[in-house]
Every structure is written in structure tokens, then in C-alpha cells.
Amino acid sequence: MKYRPPPGAVAALALLLGINLFNYIDRQILAAVEPEIRATFFAPTDENAMAKTGALGMLFLITYMLAAPALGWLADRFSRWIIVGTAVLFWSLATGATGLATSFAMLVIFRVLVGVGEGGYGPTAPTILADLFPVERRARIMAYFCAAIPVGSALGYVLGGAVTTHLTWRAAFYILTVPGLLLGLICFFQRDPRGLGSGGKVRKRARREDYGKLLRTRSYGYNMVAQTAMTFAAGGMGFWMAEYLNSRGQPPGARIIFGGIVVVAGLLSTLAGGWIADRIRSRYAAADFLVSGIGMLIAVPIFIVMLFTPFPLAWVFMFAAVFLLFLNTGPSNAAIANVSLPNMRERAFALNIFIIHLFGDVAAYPIIGYIGGHTNMTVAFFVVSIMILIGGLAWIGGMKYLPSDYANVDHVMSGTMTSA
């Protein structure tokens, strides 16, 4: 029988995909215009300027990861669409205000407010999709949703590069405000599918013992370690790519080339990773981790070769590395939904967000900036290759636990579903 998604499922996916797209455009446009921001607020002789602008991204992510659990708690008690819509409106206004900053302190405040808004969206959107689509399709659905990550990140670089070429870095933030406000308003007209992920019954709220079960789920822990390493690598590379290209003698227009690579390679890879994982699931119960881990491990030597290859040939290796780096996006996020009970999904994603950003890109921004400022960007990016290796090994190591953790959730869902 041909699968038919429930009413409103495709529209919800399209809306959340659109929001996620602007979410990542906003994140990476800051990285794309980082050299111009640095030139505006710091003297050329300040050797700590890169560490300071790196801290700007770090503070945004600290706020984001702290806001996510709190707003995830609210999403467990109120309409998730209201939480998402309010969050999108809030961060869109804060994004526009970023362009108005007349001091570095003001810039910090506005980026912190953006982090608060995004904290209401991050842990909530995937749980809506998990309630709308079954397990056997979640890797693909999460891949569609997460396709906004490479595309949005790349568009952030493209838009930032184009705007700074013809206008100023401030205009880049103004441009993002209106689309975000429109998408936020549409959320208030959506219906929360809460309960569909529990067989149509009302979900019980999470209890203390449910948190204990989640933290004892070994595949969840391995997934967090791997995603943390991936977030360090991808976040650090994305934020400092503009400076890396500058250090290798590439003109500002090279940021647009990098953006194009991330769009094509990242999009194709994200969609392929979800499709492959769902296709081989019947043969490999740990397909989500297998696809994720293999992609990361193959990416390591390719990324290292890219660091020592002259341009323009280096773009070829960069394309391959980005493709392999994004294979895990759909499968790894589907694994979070699949090993957590419906009443714990918001918390599972919120805790994951907290951990992967605390030890991932929050750490990556200043660490890579410090290393790059005191040595060179090639040495700094070599740290990225180490984190890619750690991520791949963690996913491979978690493969032996994933099938039993999936089975445990299926057993609870089929045998103990009750109304609140």
C-alpha cells in the first residue's frame, strides 16, 4: 500500500524547512561578514581581534543552548507551533537589530537575543516531524528538514559575500528580517500534532525516571559524542572559512564559491544520507550510525589533503570533504527521535543541543580563532580533521547498541501506551 502522510504533514515539513533555512542563513551570515565586522570594531594591530569575534559566535551559542532546555520545557506544556512562531518572530527582530549595532557590546547583546529566539525552535521542530511521520521514514524526513543546514549556511556565505561587495555588512542582517517575520506569523495558523507519535493517544508528561532512561540509553550517548565532534568541525570550519580563504590568498569572492560548494555538496549529501539509511535499514539495523560513521571516517584524509593542496584544485577536495561530512545529518537526528519516547523527545533534542554546542562549536570558535591568530589557519583547521575522526569513531562505536535501543522504544510504545 502506498504511504500517505497525515493531513498537514507535508505543509508542516515545508514550513519548518523554510524556517530552518533562514535559521542557518542567519547563523552563517555572521561568519561570512566576520572580517568586515572585525575591521569595524577592532584595530588591525589587535592580535586578539579574531578571538573576540569568535567569542561573539560563542556567546550566541551559549545563549541558544541554555534557552533550548527551558523553552523545550514550555513546548511540552503549550502548543509547539505557538512556541516556534514566537521564537521565530523574536529572533528575526533581533537579527535586524544586529545591523544597527554601533559598538561591539551592542552586537553581543543582539546576537544573544537571537540565541534566545533560536532556542525556542531548535528542540521543538524535530519533535513535530517525529509525531507526523513513522520510524521507517524519519531518516529521510529529517534529511529533508536538515537540508536547510548546508543550503542555509551556504546562502549565508553567498548573501554575505554579495552584500558586502555592493553595500555594507549591516545590510546583510536587514535583509533577513522580513522573511523571518512572515514565516513566524504563519506558525500561529498551524495545528499541533501532539499525540500522533503515541498512536493517536495523549502523551504522558515526562517523569524523573524517564530522564534516567534517556541518559542510560547508550546509543543516545554515543550519538551526542559524535554530534559534538561534528558540530565542532562543521561549526568551526564554517565560522572561520572566510579567514581561512583570506590566509590562502583567495579574494572575497571565494566565499561565494565556498557557499556554492556547501549548497551542492551539502544538499546532495544530506538527502543521500537519509535515503541510504532508510534503504539499508532492513539489512543493517544500525544503518543510521553506519552511514554517519563511514562518511566521517572517509572525510578525514580528504580534508587533510585539501589543507595542503593549492587552489583551485583544493576546491575539489573541499567539495568531497563537505559531501562526506553532511551524510550523517538526517540519520543522526532520526536516531535521537527513534531512541526516545514521545514524551521525552523535546527534552532529548534539547539536551542534545545543549551538549553538542557546549563542547562543539562554542568551544570551536575561540579555540580555532586563538590557534589561527597565534600560528596560522592551516594549523587551526588541522584541529578540525581530528574532530571529524573522533565523530566517525563514536558513531561506529555506538552501532552495537542502536538496534536494541530502537527495540526498547518499540516495546514500550506497543505495550504501555496509555492516556494521561
Image (tube, helix red, strand yellow):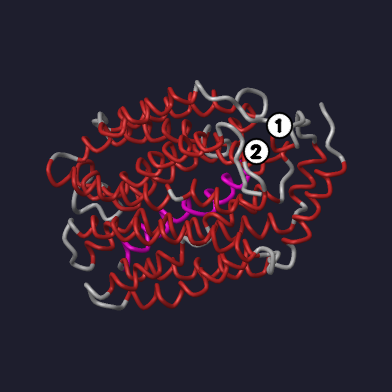
Residue at the (87%, 43%) spot, across then down: 415
Q: Position of residue 408 (x, y in %)?
A: 81, 52
Q: Main secondary structure of the magenta part?
A: helix
Element class at badge 1: loop
Residue 245's place in the image compared with 354, above or below, is below
Q: Amino acid at mark 2?
A: Asp
Residue at the (63%, 23%) spot, across then down: 78
120 relative position to 255: left or right: right
Quadrant position of the C terminus in the picture: top right
309 and 360: which is toward the camera: 309
Q: Bounds of the magenta span?
A: 349-375
The tag earlier along the polypeptide, 2 or 1, is 2
289 and 214: which is toward the camera: 289
40 and 122: which is toward the camera: 122
Which numbered disc covers residue 131? 2
Residue 105's place in the image compared with 282, above or below, is above
Residue 354 magenta:
yes
Please name the residue that numbered disc 1 is placed on.
Answer: 195
Which numbered disc covers residue 234? none
What residue occupies the far right of the structure in this picture? 415
